[in-house]
Image (cartoon, helix red, strand yellow):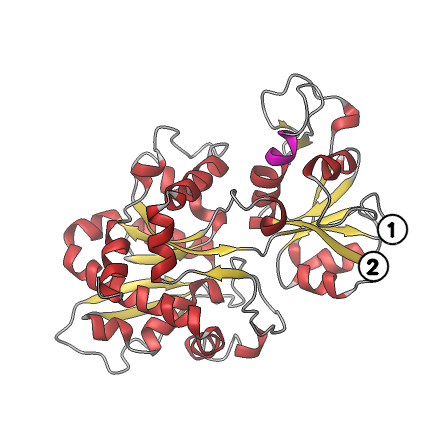
């Protein structure tokens, strides 16, 4: 697949500072119901852009009004019911597991491979490679200093996916731990918090990581595109030593599509049609990722150029792959991965299971419809 220069992350903060409403009155059919959706300004939400601009939504029987914005703002709106459906990145996925369940997971979108542990060639991790075992990586992480943004998905990936997998290779009393911004020792429940087992995490804005790492202050960085890609290109200074595909293939926490549950209960037929259009958008992105980049450029009024997007940072699920994930149990496993990654959030209701947080039947029906089954 063609590699394109990165300017933004798959599930990162939007490049657009304020929300922007899509050209949703273009060719709008007044006889059709309207669905209000939220889109990130990246390829993660690309299926929504292509479903709109390739007329898949209208062909399925719905008008769509879309709003482009950052993850937290869009999550707030879909929870409040100001949006009916929204693309959701990992950073705000805790909203699925609250007591009132204002939203549910309607679909998995992609299996991102964008989060990366990057070693400085002048730091403690200089001898590690992507072939190094989790235990080998863990032994080097002990006592090292890692720069990462505590507000982004790479922090979630590191603390809830990579670190737990590494700790499974250590005996009790030897597991790695860290301190959060409030000074709390995490993970909770370890038998000991010995100083030699601590990994030192420093909260650095993702936008500042490149400059920070070039200063050779840290042993590692954890980031996603475009910062991770910029660091990787400096092969004389940095190298990636771990990412989901190399060490955590069963630990995916996919990006998702959220539906407001109150709206769904009142508009089930409309949502069924919407999902058919969305699945067609997924197929289109899977087969034509560069074309989807062009749709994103159009949808963001040029704020995001097609040439700035990288098509190689995820598995872009199509209808057949969605059905495969559903039938082999991976769809629910990945949903449980999302849940496990959010249990430490005080706003999460631990009684909300993966099954309660999701409503995949509309996705599966849409996939079957699109495939003519």
Within 10 Å of disc 1 (Cα), the crowding (few <14, some 14-19, many 20+) is some
Q: How many marks?
A: 2
Up-down relation of residue 185 to residue 241 (above or below) = above
Residue drawn at the location 65% of the way across and 16% of the way down: 191
The part of the chain drawn in magenta is 164-168
Asked if residue 258 is among those painted magenta in the image, a careful observer would answer no
Q: Residue at the location (28% across, 53% down)?
A: 81
Task: Give the x, y percent position of residue 25.
Answer: 27, 78
| Residue position marked by numbered label 1 in the rendering | 122
Q: Can you give x and y, in whole percent of width and height, for residue 292 in the image?
A: 44, 74
Q: Quadrant of the C terminus?
A: bottom left
- Residue 193, image x and y in percent? 70, 21
Residue 339 has which mark? none
User: Disc 1 vs disc 2: Cβ atoms closer than 8 Å?
Assistant: yes
Asked if residue 50 is positioned above or below residue 132 in the image, the reply reads below
Give the image location of residue 130, x and y in percent: 71, 50
Q: Compare marks 1 and 2 and give the one earlier in the sequence.
A: 1
Residue 51 or residue 315, whichever sits in front: 315
C-alpha gap between disc 1 and disc 2: 7 Å
Residue 190's place in the image compared with 364, above or below, is above
> In terms of secondary structure, where does tag 1 sit?
loop
Mark 2, Cα crowd under 10 Å, few <14 / some 14-19 / many 20+, is: some
Residue 164 shown left or right of residue 336 in the figure:
right
Which residue is at the front of the view, 111 or 76? 111
Q: Residue at x 38, y 72 (%)?
A: 284
| SS for dot 2 | loop
- Furthest residue toward left: 31
Q: Kindly give the residue lying farthest to the top in the view shown.
A: 191
Location of the N terminus (image quadrant): bottom right
Q: Which residue is drawn at 77% across and 60% down?
A: 211
Residue 237 is tagged as 2
Residue 166 covered by magenta stretch:
yes
């Amino acid at each position: 697949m063609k590699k394109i220069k990165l300017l933004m992350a798959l599930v990162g903060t939007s490049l657009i500072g304020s929300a922007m409403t899509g050209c949703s009155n273009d060719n709008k059919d007044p006889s059709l119901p309207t669905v209000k959706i939220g889109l990130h300004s990246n390829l993660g939400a690309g299926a929504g852009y292509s479903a709109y601009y390739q007329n898949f939504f209208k062909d399925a029987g719905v008008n769509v009004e879309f709003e482009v914005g950052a993850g937290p703002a869009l999550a707030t709106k879909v929870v409040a019911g100001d949006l009916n459906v929204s693309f959701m990145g990992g950073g705000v996925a805790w909203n699925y597991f609250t007591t009132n369940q204002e939203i549910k997971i309607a679909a998995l979108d992609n299996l991102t491979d964008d989060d990366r542990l990057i070693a400085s060639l002048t730091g403690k991790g200089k001898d590690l490679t992507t072939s190094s075992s989790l235990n080998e990586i863990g032994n080097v992480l002990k006592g090292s200093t890692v720069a990462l943004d505590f507000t982004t998905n790479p922090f979630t990936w590191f603390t809830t996916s990579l670190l737990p997998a590494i700790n499974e290779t250590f005996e009790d009393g030897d597991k790695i731990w860290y301190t959060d911004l409030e000074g709390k020792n995490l993970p909770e429940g370890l038998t000991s918090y010995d100083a030699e087992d601590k990994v030192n995490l420093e909260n650095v804005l993702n936008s500042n990581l490149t400059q920070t790492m070039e200063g050779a202050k840290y042993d590692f960085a954890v980031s996603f595109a475009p910062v991770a890609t910029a660091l990787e290109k400096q092969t004389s200074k940095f190298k990636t030593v771990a990412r989901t595909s190399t060490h955590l293939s069963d630990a995916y926490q996919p990006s998702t599509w959220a539906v407001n549950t109150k709206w769904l209960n009142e508009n089930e037929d409309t949502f069924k049609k919407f999902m058919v259009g969305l699945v067609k958008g997924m197929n289109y992105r899977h087969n034509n990722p560069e074309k989807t980049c062009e749709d994103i450029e159009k949808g963001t009024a040029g704020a995001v150029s097609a040439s700035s997007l990288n098509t190689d940072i995820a598995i872009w699920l199509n209808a057949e792959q969605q059905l495969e994930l559903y039938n082999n149990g991976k769809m629910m496993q990945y949903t449980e991965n999302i849940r496990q990654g959010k249990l430490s959030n005080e706003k999460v209701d631990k009684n909300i299971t993966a099954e309660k947080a999701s409503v995949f039947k509309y996705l599966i029906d849409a996939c079957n419809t699109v495939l003519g089954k």
